[in-house]
Amino acid sequence: MSDTQETKQFVEDLADQGDDFSRWYIEVVRKAQLADYAPVRGCMVIRPYGYAMWENMQRLLDARIKATGHQNAYFPLLIPESLLQLEAEHVEGFAPQVAWVTQGGNDVLEERLAIRPTSEAIIGRMYSRWIESYRDLPILLNQWCNVMRWEKVTRLFLRTTEFLWQEGHTAHATAAECQEEVLRMLEVYRDFAETDLAIPVHAGRKSESEKFAGAEMTYCIEALMRDGKALQAGTSHNLGQHFARVFDITFQDEQGKRQHVHQTSWGVTTRLIGAIIMTHGDDQGLKLPPRVAPVQAVVVPIWRKDEERAAVKEFIGRVTAALAGRVRLLVDDREQYTPGWKYNEHELRGVPVRLEVGPKDVAKGAVMSVRRDTRVKESIALDQLPERLPALLDDIQRALFEAAKAYRDENTAIASTVQELEAHFASRRGFVAVPWDGSAAFEAEVKEKTGATLRCVPLDQTPWKGLARAGQDVALFARAY
Amino acid sequence: MSDTQETKQFVEDLADQGDDFSRWYIEVVRKAQLADYAPVRGCMVIRPYGYAMWENMQRLLDARIKATGHQNAYFPLLIPESLLQLEAEHVEGFAPQVAWVTQGGNDVLEERLAIRPTSEAIIGRMYSRWIESYRDLPILLNQWCNVMRWEKVTRLFLRTTEFLWQEGHTAHATAAECQEEVLRMLEVYRDFAETDLAIPVHAGRKSESEKFAGAEMTYCIEALMRDGKALQAGTSHNLGQHFARVFDITFQDEQGKRQHVHQTSWGVTTRLIGAIIMTHGDDQGLKLPPRVAPVQAVVVPIWRKDEERAAVKEFIGRVTAALAGRVRLLVDDREQYTPGWKYNEHELRGVPVRLEVGPKDVAKGAVMSVRRDTRVKESIALDQLPERLPALLDDIQRALFEAAKAYRDENTAIASTVQELEAHFASRRGFVAVPWDGSAAFEAEVKEKTGATLRCVPLDQTPWKGLARAGQDVALFARAY
């Protein structure tokens, strides 16, 4: 099969985003070998390429979580039903989604055990044991783990029965410190999403109907995907004293008085991998932000005659030596594929930069770099490479963010009434900013007539100054994942 | 309460190893805040100090796993019963220990789902989909995750219903490559245990009765705890083609012939934290190997008069600046505890080095270092600290290993007959090396008469040269965890 035929077939296999975004999404996830369906309903296998991205994301976010004073810990997978039932709103919200263990070995259990859908209940029980005095506060813990929610409709990364996440759980002496923590972690998420994942987000608060089951207030970051649908990318909850009351989490304050603690919880999940795919990808496949890309640059050797081969190989040895420890590099020296085939595969897999090395490049003492995002080519001399390639990766990181932000801003409209929202969503998607009277009735009417939900009330209202009357805020509506 | 009273009380609370090793173990785990009991039978909470140790262990072992060519991935928590049942020995070995999910949300499931006790079955199913040709081999994957085994008797870290581990799963074209991988990973474990955890181990093969359910051959590393009982610290299995046959994992070889793959699996768990505690600890508490200690050195400020306080504090600022990025340092500036109390607490928690900083030290421009293992004191000038402290930590790491090895060797005897083994175990513990005829009958007789089991047949037989007749090997017997 010729190079052209191969290339054609490879690209033809991938659906166009414009024709069928959902099909494009699933195909790109599976062809890029990010994930695969598992032989268990609604579960996925995260393949090495997808997991390496998650590891990079974990490393970057974990450093931010630790830099803000938190420590990691690990709490049990299973939660006794009686414990889960203590907080009424919480159990009502999660019970329909719980997978239950009813047998251990050959014995039927006396009490059902929930596979954790989230860990407020079990952590609350431990906090009630550990906290005695104001000196024990704040407790600032985080855990990286798997959780399970029995979803009816699932989609790789976006909504799976089992997923991976981090969940932070903190306890504070005062309501003010608690709220400060909630907003601190929201800002950590915003900065992580925008700086490391190149995903522009709106940080805001949720309405009553969209808040976490058991929380006093939920804050979130919301992103816009390339099909115009919104995606909740992270949440930070102010739990107030709800859990402290039912789990009896109290401390003796400096005056010797017993008080309930104030708590937060906050999390992001493997869903963010779906957000990266749908924020940056195009008809040729993924475009991965360099900071989290498992492979930041792929080297493709090119030769036609055997005598060229040794020289190309030797030069590539010098390229890898020059870049060692600076760039996550892959040399694709598979012999069964043509360079053209490799170009397409690595474009599909979203590798930010391709470095072509052929006899002409070797003669010049340079490599030909090709950006995944813009296809711009640039010959880079070997001795410039250790400086130039990291700078190029920084450019790409910035460019991906700017492109996504431009798309998001182009797809953000304004409206003043339900009628205007209806007119908008009849033919378009994206975010619509609307003055909101704070009523659930307005939300419900919009949802019924347009399918759009209130994504958040942005903390930063300045872009919509003057749109809402005094005392009211603007809310963002969108159809959402 | 005076300093002396406090100290006394703190130490009195901890059982002596010689009086009741089991009580000492549980008390040290809980007082050092490594772990706590969870409100679910047999499960534990790994607290920040214990989890930080696990994170250090993960980082060091993960680097070794990746350096030997493996990639991480993630497979589902739940395994359909029908899948688990395919390999007969495997299901027979694990079925009595499985926790079963039988309900999802409000629905009763048609098929029970096992919480993974290990992942051969689900990974086997995926490998049968992914592997087509010899070009897809070897597959070298690893996953870090939680697993569950419904144990009747549990003990924090050593045997818990849920535990954390890594499990490697590889597939190869030939039996020779497969066996090479099994021994490569056994050597990775040996080196990790000895170099990073300072735990001397015997690497060897298991007998038929002790091998992994479904394996052709199991290899292990075996350590000796300070109560004279052995502990299996890691295993590496040659699965042969057992799983490949039942899961239909085949590839087309270079000649176009279809063949079954050859597989390995290998794992170590949070049990290793228990091994560290029981290899190095003493009546004062933990002694943590510097390479995995969450805190490598703790700075304790000492002052009596208020005017000394500022100078001590300022000097400690210079100490932390000098050591930044070189040593995991904690400054214990809690005001509610005396220096004496802090000394005891950090000894209990096994911090390798204490740095005392009082007015006299400040006057000398030095800190007083105290080793946890030998109590040896040494005044170190501030400008020497960045060189001397890391060297001191290396010394401690080596000394812990040497001390453990000396203990292990002193507690390794030899015997020639079952009678001699009986005589040994009537009054002593430790390893006993015995020439083994390879029969299960011999093993069974020893177990019945002494309670000791065959821990392994060491790969390196040189320490017992001449003990076994030609063609036979020496096996190590011990009572074990």
Image: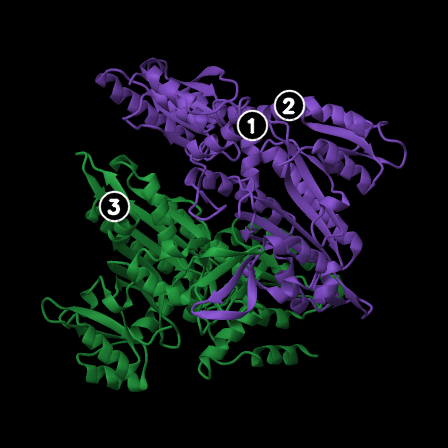
Chain colours: A purple, B green
Q: Is residue A390 above or below residue B180?
A: above
Q: Residue at x 46, y 55 (%)?
A: B110
Residue type marked 2: Tyr
Q: Can you give x and y, in whole percent of width and height, for residue A165 in the image?
A: 56, 48
Q: Residues within 10 Å of mark 3 (few under 14, many from 20)?
A: many
Looking at the image, is mark 1 or mark 3 nearer the viewer? 3
SS category of the residue bearing label 1: helix
For disc 2, the chain is A
Residue type marked 1: His
Q: Residue at x 76, y 27 (%)?
A: A421
Q: Can you give x and y, in whole percent of width and height, for residue B301 in the image?
A: 65, 63
For disc 3, the chain is B
Q: Is residue B84 above or below residue B23?
A: above
* Quadrant of the frame with the N terminus of chain B: bottom right
Q: Nearer the viewer, residue A277 or A459?
A: A277
Q: Nearer the viewer, residue B84 or B144?
A: B84
SS category of the residue bearing label 3: loop
Q: Relative to residue A313, is residue A409 drawn left or right?
A: right
Q: Nearer the viewer, residue A283 or A124?
A: A283
- Report if residue A298 is visible in the image: yes
2 and 1 marks in contact (CB < 8 Å): no
The residue at which mark 3 appears reads as B261
- Report if residue B369 is visible in the image: no
SS category of the residue bearing label 2: helix
The residue at which mark 1 appears reads as A280
1 and 3 marks in contact (CB < 8 Å): no
2 and 3 marks in contact (CB < 8 Å): no
The residue at which mark 2 appears reads as A407
Q: Residue at x 80, y 66 (%)?
A: A254
Q: Relative to residue B451, is residue A71 drawn left or right?
A: right
Q: Can you give x and y, in whole percent of width and height, for residue B452 in the image?
A: 29, 77
Q: Can you give x and y, in whole percent of width and height, for residue B305 in the image?
A: 74, 67
